[in-house]
Image (cartoon, helix red, strand yellow):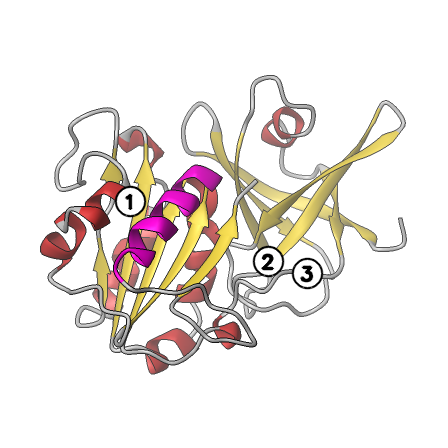
Amino acid sequence: MADWIPAKVITNRHWNHDLFSLVLEANIEPFKAGQFTKLGLEIDGKMIQRAYSFVNPPTSAQIEIYATRVADGTLSPRLHALEAGDEVFISARANGFFTLNEIPDSEHLWLLATGTAIGPYLSILREPTVWKRFRKIVLSHAVRFSADLSYQAEINQLQERYPDQLVVQPFVSREPAPPALPGRIPQAIADGMLERHVGLSLEPERSHIMLCGNPEMVKDTKAALEARGFQKNLRRQPGQITMEHYW
């Protein structure tokens, strides 16, 4: 329990029936963009906790967490129901290595996410470092329905600020939603559709790919990239694929 501190809810933004963003105030330790924290509530005498990535950049005075309510879950329905002024426990210290300092230099950075896993990318993109390191950045967010494409205003602001660097390509799998592409990210890499639509080639010599999302997407996308000559990024052996499973 020593690492838990109270966090005050400032707002709870409901994007749709299940997706929500908590904005919190708490005196946490400094963190790096791309890292995650833990939120917890005491339920029936036990601390129920789950890891969530920061959506806000480290320079922000407030903490933001993007999450989805799981209907039969223990914690997420209660987080979904929190209101301004309520308290939740947060870990004072961040964790994780899904950060830019773990990534080798390259010309193009591809940020591929499913669902709420877009959160750490928003934290990374709101820091100046990423724009200084990469000539082009592709942000691809895959969801089931267009209503699940949260943070569009923030993404549009980033496009307006970095029009020559940022390319955004969403995917919507269960309904037609142009300009979003149909289907799944792994298939769009395998058949070249993603490259055609963003106007950039996936080349190991010029590209680094960050994968964050459900394990099936991460596994299948990694396989599609390995078939193209990409390798997993390790500290002892730098490669071009950096991964984070989002549950």
Q: Quadrant of residue 170?
A: top left
Q: In the image, is 126 to the left or to the right of 26?
A: left
Q: Which is more foreground, mark 2 or mark 1?
A: 1
Q: Please name the residue that numbered disc 2 is placed on.
A: 62
| Earlier sequence position, callout 2 versus callout 1 | 2
Label the magenta part by its dominant secondary structure.
helix
Amino acid at pointer 1: Pro
Q: Point out residue 197 in the picture as x, y percentages from the top left corner.
A: 11, 52
Q: Is residue 50 magenta?
A: no
Q: In the image, is 14 to the left or to the right of 35?
A: left
Residue in view at x 90 percent, y 54 percent: 2
- Mark seen at residue 217: none
Amino acid at pointer 3: Ala
Tell me the magenta residue range: 215-228
Q: Please name the residue that numbered disc 3 is placed on.
A: 94
Amino acid at pointer 2: Gln
Label 1 to label 3: alpha-carbon separation = 30 Å
Residue in view at x 62 percent, y 61 percent: 96
Residue 65 drawn above or below residue 82: below
| Earlier sequence position, callout 1 versus callout 3 | 3
Q: Point out residue 136 in the picture as x, y percentages from the top left corner.
A: 24, 71
Residue in view at x 64 percent, y 23 percent: 73
Observer-nearest residue: 58 or 224? Answer: 224
- Mark seen at residue 186: 1
Q: Secondary structure at mark 2?
A: loop
Q: In the image, is 188 to the left or to the right of 237?
A: left
- How many callouts does the rendering have? 3
Q: Point out residue 85 in the picture as x, y percentages from the top left corner.
A: 69, 39
